[in-house]
Image: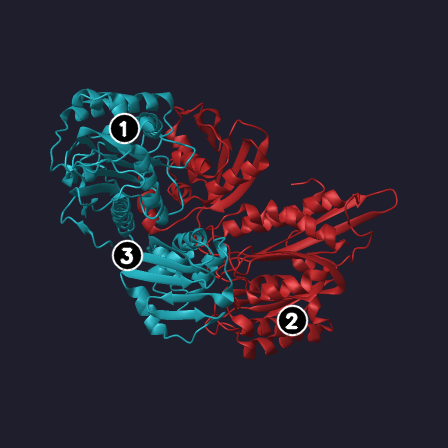
Chain colours: A cyan, B red
Amino acid sequence: MHEDICTIPGGHVTSVLGFLAGAVRAGIREDVDKLDLGILYSERPCAAAAVFTSNRVKAAPIVVCQKHLADGRAQAVVANSGCANACTGEDGLRDAREMAELTAAKLGLRPEDVVVASTGVIGCPMPMERVRPAIRDVAVSADGGGALAQAIMTTDTVPKQIAVRFAWHQPAEGRQYTIGGIAKGAGMIHPQMATMLCFLATDAPAESGFLGAALRQAVDASFNMITIDGDTSTNDMVVVLANGAAGGEPLAEGHPAAGLFLAALTQVCAHLAQAICRDGEGATKFIQVRVEGAASDADARRAAREIVRSLAVKTAVYGSDPNWGRILAAVGNSGADMVEESTTLYLGECCLYRGGRPLDYDESAAHAELARPEVDIRVDLGLGDGAATAWGCDIPDEYVRLNSAYRT
Amino acid sequence: MHEDICTIPGGHVTSVLGFLAGAVRAGIREDVDKLDLGILYSERPCAAAAVFTSNRVKAAPIVVCQKHLADGRAQAVVANSGCANACTGEDGLRDAREMAELTAAKLGLRPEDVVVASTGVIGCPMPMERVRPAIRDVAVSADGGGALAQAIMTTDTVPKQIAVRFAWHQPAEGRQYTIGGIAKGAGMIHPQMATMLCFLATDAPAESGFLGAALRQAVDASFNMITIDGDTSTNDMVVVLANGAAGGEPLAEGHPAAGLFLAALTQVCAHLAQAICRDGEGATKFIQVRVEGAASDADARRAAREIVRSLAVKTAVYGSDPNWGRILAAVGNSGADMVEESTTLYLGECCLYRGGRPLDYDESAAHAELARPEVDIRVDLGLGDGAATAWGCDIPDEYVRLNSAYRT
């Protein structure tokens, strides 16, 4: 947490100046009674940047967005849950384009300034006969951010949203900027709805090149450090829109507020990424893994991510079983440089392993560390200055319960 | 299956000429009542080769074996379940060496000619006070292969063993060689006991360089094509011993029977690898994935392995849910070259996707393909001649049941 960045209580994506949102129930899945289509709209044109899935199978809205965002400009997002519009061929592309066109016509924009995002089942056609009237019916307002957050939920049990504000002072000007965001997560054990979506809005002005670089850095330290199941979906997308409504010179490399903006953007992304882990399907515990002393930051990232990815670790955490060998095995499996003799392992305050051998630790204290709702794993590789933090959740279920109790 | 290679009914590792084995209950885990320590012994010195875990955390027996097998010779294996002797520091190395020394003394061998293998919990010291008398008590015999297969079992529900025989004829000589093997598998959802072990024996004579190359090829097409959970353990080991008891010139590159030997060794390894998948903890279905038409064999291997690794695919198979988009997404996630428009996807006989779009397939037929105990997935990437086959199993449990039925 940066001391100059404060979280707005109850804040969301339309807590940001000049952004409006709204959502309706389109009935995209007839059997699900919830908001499922929404729009985020900026009253002013925005600099825009996005990070997309690395999967070679890209959903139609991803293909359309990559084109629409090529100029670094956008002014609205239309998003739906219930249908991913992935693996749908030419028909899917046509439907995604039509969603952008209908939204643009409604708001008086060019279709190229509309971002399209979908989440839901892969391989099913978009039910456009229900989508068309729904887009027409959406009413956007300054308090619609919460409804939009609900409209993109699938198996999520809670909406994920946040807004932060930071001020910066220079002799010539004192300004205040806000960044708001909403996200939806994947199922814990698999990307059930095939999508992680995140929409970020800010009233800060920004050059789109700077905005893109800042977004990639923020995503690398947040969404790219959570592991739900190791699968990458066809629809994953993080988008940021900067409308400049709060005034000032556009943020760019070397701008005195650039560092503060990056810190605030990272804080928003980290909050949303962690919220996705906390809401993993059926998850009972949130896991934070800190790796320090790695030969490089890249090695630390590899090791931290492999620990939260490992099913062996997840199930041991679920069973509160301090089977720490699995954590070391995950590090050994990660590709990061490591030497057993220089490695130290902590569960919370409890040091379990050091100098190439298990310590004579207090088993009940180790168990207690794992019984917390927020489990803290820390590994010091003793090789250098590389450090990274990753987040995840445990894997619960009756089947796993039997196995996770194996050691005890 | 090669037509000149026949499986010996009820065959196992001591179906091979000159190999003896035996096992006892050492009580390494006091709460488990089963055979847990055994010895495989060849009456003659053997050429030996092994493939070890790629994990940087290597169990003590792995470290010891790498040293003992450096000269390409061995004559016995001592193996235990219940304790992995991993992350145990200098004490663990001392214990692993002592296990080799005691076995060597008992059999009149040099300690360097004994392979040591352990499977069980990581980070617990080997209970040598129980291991020492157990090694003394093992009685080896020509029908002891089955007992040894049981002694290395952990959460396995059935022993995994096979023996095959092949004859080859040349003007000067007609000979018959046998290859036998036993293996133990990891738990389905995590390497519960931290180990996949496999011991192979043959009465064919072989140069150790040839034997090592043949083993690597056989393992690449078998054990390296199964995915239990994506974790690589600290103890994984496949060892082959060739004692030459059946006579003839040592197999080497260019030997007229070299190809047949490689085929037979691969067949034994593939049988044991598939047996590990079939016995995945709680698994209800065996999955075979064939990828063809890839730009290269390496790409085909990547794609096939990623499909059987994907939790999204495993859970869909468990629920007999033809959610084929997850299979395409796994291919897209694998790093293999792929183009949606040239990709064709089959479930058994049922073609679901071709030419960039879903086909109008028979949903009940697709469901029936997934309801089989052996599920067959085939992907033609339409790009080249690369092909590979991978094997795995589904993920069952109440938690997943809810999710796997999502689409229906």
Residue shown at the point (84%, 43%) measured from the top left: B170
What label does residue A269 carry, if any? none
- Give the Cα separation between the discs numbered 2 and 1: 69 Å
What label does residue B100 carry, if any? 2
Q: Amino acid at mark 3?
A: Thr
Q: Please, is residue A299 above or below residue B110 in the view?
A: above
Residue A152 in picture, x, y percent from top left: 23, 37
Residue B379 in picture, x, y percent from top left: 50, 32
Q: Residue furthest right?
A: B172
- Give the Cα separation between the discs numbered 2 and 3: 45 Å
What label does residue A284 carry, if any? 3
Residue B325 in picture, x, y percent from top left: 39, 34
Q: Which dot, 1 or 3, sits closer to the camera?
A: 1
Q: Amino acid at mark 1?
A: Arg
Q: Are marks 2 and 1 in contact (CB under 8 Å)?
A: no
Q: Please, is residue B400 above or below residue A148 in the view?
A: below
Asked which quadrant contains residue A100, the reply is: top left
Element type where label 3 sits in the image = loop
Q: Please, is residue A10 above or below residue B186 in the view?
A: above
Report how many numbered discs are placed on residues in the image. 3
For mark 3, name the chain: A
In this rendering, would A155 be left or right of B88? Answer: left
For mark 2, name the chain: B
What label does residue A73 carry, if any? 1
Q: Amino acid at mark 2?
A: Ala
Residue A195 in picture, x, y percent from top left: 32, 38
The N terminus of chain B lies in quadrant:
top right
Asked which quadrant contains residue A24, the reply is: top left
